[in-house]
Amino acid sequence: MRRVAVVGLGTTQFRARWTEKTYFELGFEAAKSALADAGLSRADVDCCVYGMSNDFFSRQSQPDMILHDYIGLPPKPSVRVNSGGATGGSALRIGFAEIASGMYDSCLVLGVEKCADCFDYEAGRSSPEMLRAALYAADMTYDNPAGRTAVSGYALAVAAHQEKFGGPAEEQMAKVSIKNHGNAIRNPNAQSPKEITIEDVMNSPKICGPFKLFDNCVISEGASAVILMSEEKAKEVAKNPVWITGVGAAHDWPSAGSRENLYEFAGSRIAARRALDMAGVNDARRDLDLAELNDAFTATEIMAYEDCFLCGEGEGGRMIDEGATLADGDMPVNLSGGLIGCGHAAGATGIMQTIEVCLHLRGEACERQRANARRGLVQSCGGPQNAWTVCLVLERGDA
Amino acid sequence: MPFNIGQRAKWYKYYSEKFGVSEDRLKREFEKELSGGTEIDDPLEIPDKMEIIFKYSYGEQSRFFRELRENKRIMGAKCVKCGQVYCPPRGDCHLCYEPTEWVELSGKGTIVSHTVQYVTASALVRKTPFICCYVQLDGADTLLMTNLEMDDVEKCQKGMRVVAHFRHDRHGDINDFYFKVAK
C-alpha cells in the first residue's frame, strides 16, 4: 500500500443558510480553494470522490453528476459516496484507497450539503421540513412511522449508556456544549460561535430525551474539499504535506435490535482501534495531540472519548470534568468547534474535521493552534446510533 | 419592475394550488421579493416540492400486515435453523441465511429503551410530545421501535410491561397498533 498525503485544503464557511450560493456554487468554491492551496489546477486532478448525503436536501438526485460538470472535471472518473453523517469520512476513505492502491496519483475529495432549501411554510422555518427529509432514511416500513429520527436514535443509546455506566450526566454534557461553542469563536468558518453558561444549556428547550437545544449540533450548509496525493507526486509539488497514516471504518447493525447491546457504539470502537493500530498508536491519550470527534450531540462526544480509547468505558464524563479536552487541556477535542460550534453539513463534515486537524499539523490554525501538534485523530460518524464510523489518523510531514 | 397587486395575487394562487401551501404563508415569505423589496442581484428564492406516489409490496412480510389488519394479531418470524424470532419480521434469518416461519406473539412486551420527542420533523409535529421506544415482545429476540401512549410521557421507564392496542381503523401498516402500559 502506498503512502497518501493531504496536499490541499479548502472549505466554505458553514452557515445555517446560504442564499448567496447554490449547492453547486458551494462545491465549486471548496474545490477552487483546495486546488489553490495545493498550487494545482483542475488539470492536475486524476479522479474525484464526492461526499453528498441527502438527495432531498439538494432537491436533486445524483447531484454529483451535475457538480462534476460545474467544476469542469469531465472526463476524470468520479464516484459519489453516501453514508449519512459519516459521508465526509467515507469519501476520504475511498479517496485514500484510490491513491494507496496505485490506481491514481491525485484525488479531489469534495463534500457538499445544503439542507435549508427544505422549508416548512406553516412554521416559517427550515428545520421541521429538513428533519422530515432526513426521516426518509429511517426504515420506511417499521421505524419511520414510529418517529425514529437521528435525535431519538441517539437519545435511546445515551439513555442505555447512562443506565449502564451512570453517565454522562447532563451537567457533563452541558460542558461539551460550552467548550465547542466557545472554540468556534476562534474559527472564522464556524456557524455557531457563542459564549454560553451551564444554565443556558440546562435551561434550553427540551428536544428529545436527555437532549436540550444546546446539546444538539447545528445543521449547516457548506462544502469542504481536500486534495489527496501519492508520496511520489506529493514530493514534487507539495510544500507542507500531511500524511494519512491510519484509516479504520465499520458499518454496525443499524437496527439496535440486532446489536448485542444498546449502551456502546461497538462499530465506532472497531473503527478507532483499526485506525490507531494502522498508525502504530499504542496509547491514544499519550500519542495523539488533538482530535476532531463526532459531537452530533454533546453526549456522543463524551462517548467518543471512550470509543477512541482516550479513556476507559464509562470514564468519558470525567475527561470533560477534568478539562482534558478543553482547548488548553492535554487532549483538545473539537478545536474547530465541532459539529456543535462549527456545524454539521453531512457530506462535508468529515472533510471539515480533517481540514481542521491538517491546519494544526501544518501550524496554520492561527489563534486556535494546538502547540507543536504532530498527530491527530478524526472520527466521522453517521446513521442511527453511529451505524457508520470512519476514523483517520493524520501526521505532520516530519513526524 | 416589481409585480403589481393583481400579479402578486395570481402568483400566490398558482403556488398555493400547486403545492398546497396557504396563500398567507406564501405571502409571509415572498411579499418582500414580489413587491420590489430586493435588488436585481440579490439571491432569489422560489417554492418547490418533490413528490412521488407509490404502490409498494411487503413481499415476504405481507402476512404480518394482513394479520394486523384483519385479525389484530402480531406475528414473529422464526428462523427454521437457529430459532431466533424476529419482530419486525424477516423472510430470511440474517445470521443463518435460512428462511423463517410464522409464529404468533402475544402482543405483550417490555420497554428496553425509551425517549420523549418534544421537537421533531414536520410530519410528526402533531404528535408531540410522544414516546419513541424499543419494545421487546414476549417470545421475540429482536427489538421493535414503536410508540407508547401514556398520559404523562415523563413517567415511562425501562422494564415497564406494555401491551399492544389495535386501532379501530386499520390500514395494513405498522401504525395499526401502538402500546399502552399493561394493567
Image: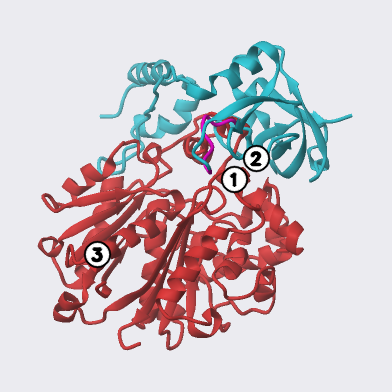
Chain colours: A red, B cyan
**Side of A231 relative to B139 (left or right):** left
Percent coordinates x, y for residue A134 in the rendering:
48, 40
| Marks 2 and 1 close (CB-CB < 8 Å) | yes
User: Is residue A163 in the magenta section?
Assistant: no
Q: Amino acid at mark 1?
A: Ser
The residue at which mark 1 appears reads as A258
* Marks 1 and 3 in Cβ contact (< 8 Å): no
- From the image, state whether disc 2 or disc 3 is nearer to you: 2
Q: Main secondary structure of the magenta part?
A: loop
- How many residues crowd mark 2 within 10 Å: few (<14), some (14–19), many (20+)? many
Question: Of residues A14 and A282, which is closer to you in this image?
Answer: A282
Residue A185: tell me if it is visible: no
Closer to the camera in the image, A360 or B36: A360
Left or right: where A172 falls relative to A130: right
Position of residue A42 measured from the top left corner of the image (x, y, whole percent): 13, 60
Q: Write down the region rendered in magenta.
A: B88-95
Please, what is the three-letter code of the amino acid marked with disc 2? Answer: Thr
- Residue ID for mark 2: B142
Residue receiving disc 3 = A33
Q: Does label 3 lie on the same chain as label 2? A: no
In the rendered image, residue B7, in percent from the top left (x then y), is placed at 32, 19
Query: Relative to A26, is B160 above or below?
Result: above
The answer to whether dots 1 and 3 both sit on one chain is yes
Q: Earlier in the sequence, mark 1 or mark 3?
A: 3
Judge from the rendering whether residue B161 lies leftward or rightward of residue A12; answer left or right.
Answer: right
Where is residue B121, by image quadrant?
top right
